[in-house]
Image: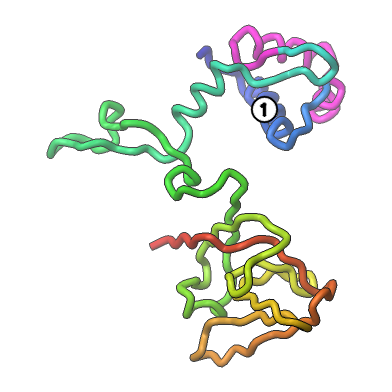
Amino acid sequence: MEPLTEKQKQVLQLIEGRLSAGKPPSQREMARHFGLSRNAICQLLDYLKKKDYLEDMGGHRGLRLSKEYLRIKEKTEGIPIVGRVAAGEPILAQENIDRHANLKELLGLPEDAFLLKVTGDSMIDEGIMDGDYVAVRPSKTIENGKIAVLLLDDETTVKRMYIQRGRITLQPANKAAGYKNKYVKRGSRRVQVIGRVIGCIRKI
């Protein structure tokens, strides 16, 4: 595809971000964002359409990413997966790259999963260390005894959660440090389930 100018890249990035959030921008909003006239924005959008980055579906907020651009993004974004390489060859030579894969694909995570960086050592006996990233599947409810990400008194925490008749037990996992269970009355607004921990990622 034909390369973009810096301003064209900025406009495309804004449109991508707004589309991913489900809020396609209007020309007026883009003009206000960049401090440009509507005519200047129209011209930039015309270039993006001519270069096959955008499609206009009509209407006030009808801009969409083109099929060609989406195809190229899918092909080139993510982590390179390298095939078998003969000794002496540069491993990341283009001919050795089979394809690119994003992190969710590599880890087999569901589409709605997100990562949360862990602070503290209260879950190290579960293999969750300070500085790790836990993969979380959003949910307002959780099975009894599973590790959850919760809001407790407006602070995010990771704990194993037990749901009992009259209360909820939040159990840490660091015997050496002597962390204690926390108890919250069942139905209390102090605690809100964000999701279930389904994986853990660590830098070496």
* Three-letter code, disc 1: Gln
Tell me the quarter of the picture where residue 115 sits: bottom right
Where is residue 49? Give x, y as percent. 66, 11
Tell me what residue is drawn at x 73 percent, y 32 percent. Answer: 18
Magenta stretch: includes residue 38: yes
Q: Determine the secondary structure under disc 1.
A: helix
Magenta span dominant secondary structure = helix
The answer to whether 90 is drawn above or below residue 115 in the figure is above
The answer to whether 121 is drawn above or below residue 79 in the figure is below
The answer to whether 148 is drawn above or below residue 137 in the figure is below
- Which residue sits furthest front? 165
Tell me what residue is drawn at x 70 percent, y 61 percent. Answer: 194
Where is residue 142? Give x, y as percent. 66, 65
Is 101 on the left-hand or right-hand side of 60?
left
Tell me what residue is drawn at x 81 percent, y 30 percent. Answer: 33
Front residue of 31 and 16: 16
Q: Which residues are magenta?
A: 27-55
- Which residue sits furthest top? 50
Magenta stretch: includes residue 23: no
The answer to whether 53 is drawn above or below residue 97 in the figure is above
Residue that carries the numbered disc 1 in the rendered image? 10
Front residue of 196 and 38: 196
Is 150 on the left-hand or right-hand side of 154?
left
Say which quadrant the C terminus sits in: bottom left
Is 112 on the left-hand or right-hand side of 165?
left
Tell me what residue is drawn at x 70 percent, y 9 percent. Answer: 46
How crowded pointer 1 is (Cα within 10 Å; few <14, some 14-19, many 20+) is rated as few
Tell me the quarter of the picture where residue 195 sits: bottom right
